[in-house]
Amino acid sequence: MNTALHAAIAAGTLLVPTVLVTAWVEGAKDRLEEAEAAPSTEPAAAVSASADVDYCSASLKKVLRRVLQSCGLAGAAGGRGCQPADAKALAGGDTAMKKGEKKAGTVSGDDFNALFMPLADRAGILQFDKDSSELDASDLALLDHVFAEQKGASYFFIVARSSPEGSVEHNRSLSQARAESALTHLRTTFKDPDLDKEVGLLWLGEEFAQLDDEFCKWQRSGATETCQPEELNRSAFVAWIDCTL
């Protein structure tokens, strides 16, 4: 057998494992994407005794899992919170197109907010002054109350927003400052060694999932006699979430 033939056989032998591994990885990726895209056929989600079974829907669990994996908890390696574009992608699997359009698979702001509606009795809305990220006495009291009601839950979410009262960039930064203000208070007040493993941050600016007047019925730190959209969205939504992910 000549040298050229030996070389060809050796090259072919080395190539086969590479091709097989590549095919296996691509196949696994395809199966994962198909599993995520397919509607769930599982029975009602198992949850801990402290959780509301009706609350932990398959859709909400999917969003929560993506937030925790893709954005990271506050103390996780690379944990950075979720920005508006992240939230759109994580909620629906794709980012939005031009303003007012949606790709297949995206979730509207209203649909995103609807996932959290069953939390009305255990969540709170911290309302900030215009152009402010400072927590006042009523904000602090509500934040402390909601955080103290853990009841065995695993993850604490802070979802901050801004009203459209300035540039998109300004409101994005403002909502980030509001989320981080709430987290800073929890760190200094509760001294919980596990806190950074429990808290997930999202800041949505004015760009995604603005709250409507349905949320006026929730626990709020703002004046109860008024609830204008611009007041409601100068806010941070806070809640413990206990779903088996």
Image (cartoon, rainbow, N blue to C red):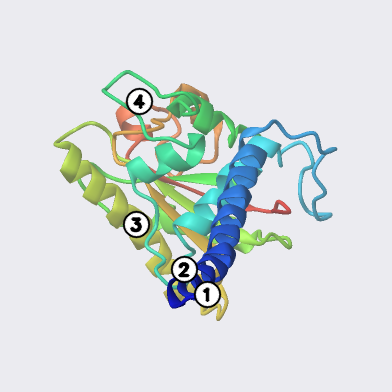
Q: Distance between the residues labelled 3 and 2?
A: 12 Å
Residue tagged 3: 135
Rendering coords of residue 116 (x, y %)? 58, 37
Residue pointed to by mark 4: 228
The kind of residue on which mark 1 rests is Phe
Element type at marker 1? helix
Is residue 237 positioned above or below 186 on the image? above
- Residue at coordinates 31% horizontally, 26% vertically from top-left? 97
C-alpha distance separating marks 3 and 1: 16 Å
Residue to which mark 1 is pinned: 190
10 Å crowding of disc 2: few (<14), some (14-19), many (20+):
some
Structural crowding at the residue carrying mark 4, measured as other residues with C-alpha within 10 Å and reported as few (<14), some (14–19) or many (≥20): few
Residue under the point 48% across and 68% down: 8
Task: Tell me the quarter of the picture where residue 57 sits.
Answer: top right
Q: Which of marks 3 and 2 is in front?
A: 2
Give the amino acid at mark 3: Leu
Residue labelled with disc 2: 186
Q: Which of 27 and 20 is in front in this view?
A: 20
Q: Which quadrant of the rendered structure holds the N terminus?
A: bottom right
Q: Does dot 4 land on a helix, a strand or a loop? A: loop
Whether residue 207 is visible to the viewer of this picture, yes or no, is yes
Q: Which of 112 and 137 is in front in this view?
A: 112
**Tag 1: Cα neighbours inside 10 Å, few (<14), some, or many (≥20)?**
few
**Among the two numbered marks 4 and 1 on one chain, the one whose residue lies closer to the N terminus:** 1
| Farthest residue, direction left | 167
Mark 2 or 4, nearer chain start: 2
Which of disc 4 and disc 3 is earlier in sequence? 3
**Discs 3, 4 touching: Cβ within 8 Å:** no
How far apart are the alpha carbons under marks 2 and 1? 6 Å
C-alpha gap between disc 3 and disc 4? 19 Å
**Disc nearest the viewer among 2 and 4:** 2
Kindly tell me whether residue 239 is visible in this rendering: no
